[in-house]
Image (tube, rainbow, N blue to C red):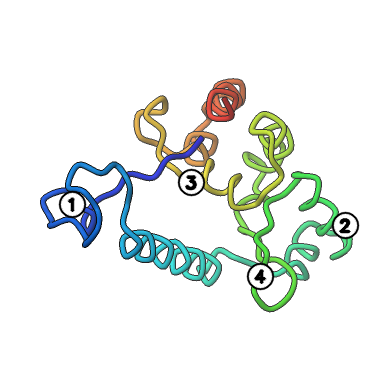
Amino acid sequence: MNTYALHAPFSPAKAPAQGVAADSPYATAAQTAVLLQSGAQYRRDRMDAADMITTDEAAELAGTSRVTINAWIKSGRCIGLAHLRRGFKLPRWQFEPTIWPVLQPLAKQLGTTDGWQLLAFLESPATALDGQTPRAALEQGVALTRILGLATAEAY
């Protein structure tokens, strides 16, 4: 399970919000709002990144149809992020030969077909990989069994 570490502006040195005890383990409503807004902004920025393509572009790249791409997203065979307007955006790099065969077994090990969870796993630095992301590790030849083992540990 991915966790999110709280950093500034959530510093414990700041005065507690009105009605919240100084030793409270809970975030204030204002802190929660800031955290949610930063997450929403991250998602918008990630969807607009240069490596993201539409389902039509993915279909052309994979030599298949948009309907097939949508089925692959639903089954966890590929990463699709629901687009605000319509359809999905997909990271282009997932169609590379070092990543493509890993996606479905990875989704199974993580127990999810959610595109954001799959993307977060592949793009988050892992201590077990000396700070590399699983994606970078795969691209550099790290064994699939090691990445799937990491996914299994992440899922539990």
- Give me the residue at 85% from left, 54% from top: 71
Q: In screen coordinates, is 99 left or right of 121?
A: right
Mark 1 residue type: Ser
Instruction: Select label 3 or label 1 by which is in front.
Output: 1
The image position of residue 82, as x and y in percent, is 68, 64
Judged left or right of residue 121, residue 30 is left
- Which of the marked residues, 2 or 3, is nearer the chain's N terminus? 2
Q: Residue at x 44, y 69 (%)?
A: 41
Q: CA distance from mark 2 to mark 1?
A: 47 Å
Amino acid on which disc 3 is placed: Glu
- In the picture of the structure, the residue carrying the numbered disc 4 is 83
Mark 4 is surrounded, within 10 Å at the Cα level, by few (under 14), some (14 to 19) or many (20 or more) other residues, namely few
Q: Nearer the viewer, mark 3 or mark 4?
A: 4
Determine which residue is flagged by label 1.
11
Q: Secondary structure at mark 4?
A: loop
Mark 2 lies on a secondary structure that is helix
Please state which of the two labelled residues, at mark 4 or mark 2, is closer to the viewer: 4
